[in-house]
Image (tube, rainbow, N blue to C red):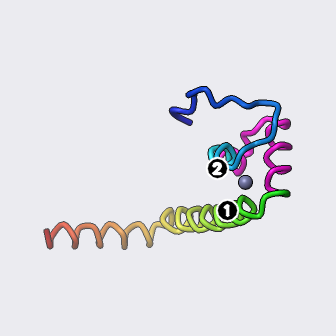
Amino acid sequence: MTAGDNGVKALGGELTCQELVELVTDYFEDALAPADRARFEAHVAGCPGCDAYLGQTRTTLEVVRATAVLQARPEVSALLEAFRAWKRGLA
Ligand SMILES: [Zn+2]
C-alpha cells in the first residue's frame, strides 16, 4: 500500500468507507490483523454501500484469478502470443 500516511489514523474507532476501500485487497489476501478484520467486517455488516462494494470486488477478483489460471495454460498462452504478434504486424 502506498501514500496512505497523510494523518488519517483513526485506529481503534470505526472504520470509514474510505478506509475500508483501502483495506479491501488486504482483506481478500488475508493480510489484515485480526482486530482490523473484525472492524472491517463490523463496518460491512452495517454499511450497505460497502457490502455491495465488497461483493463487486469479490466477483472482480474471481474473474481476475480465473483469467490468470486460463492464461497459465500452454495452449492459451500460445494463442495469446500469436494474437500479440498479429497485432504487432498491424501496427
Ligand atoms: Zn461503508
Mark 2 C-beta to ligand 1 under 8 Å: no
Please determine whether, in this image, residue 54 is positioned above or below residue 1: below
* Disc marking residue 53: 1
Q: Quadrant of ligand 1?
A: bottom right
Please determine whether, in this image, residue 43 is positioned above or below residue 54: above
Count residues near mark 2 (Cα–Cα under 10 Å), then give few for <14, some for 14-19, many for 20+: some
Q: Residue at x 72, y 47 (%)?
A: 27
Mark 1 C-beta to ligand 1 under 8 Å: yes
Q: Residue at x 29, y 71 (%)?
A: 82
Q: Residue at x 75, y 39 (%)?
A: 32
Inspect the magenta stretch and tell me whether residue 41 lies in it: yes
Task: Please name the amino acid that badge 2 sits on.
Answer: Val
Please determine whether, in this image, residue 21 is positioned above or below residue 66: above
Looking at the rendering, the stretch of residues picked out in magenta corresponds to 24-44
Inspect the magenta stretch and tell me whether residue 54 lies in it: no
User: What residue is shown with label 2?
Assistant: 21
- Whether pointer 1 and pointer 2 mark residues with C-beta atoms closer than 8 Å, the reply is yes
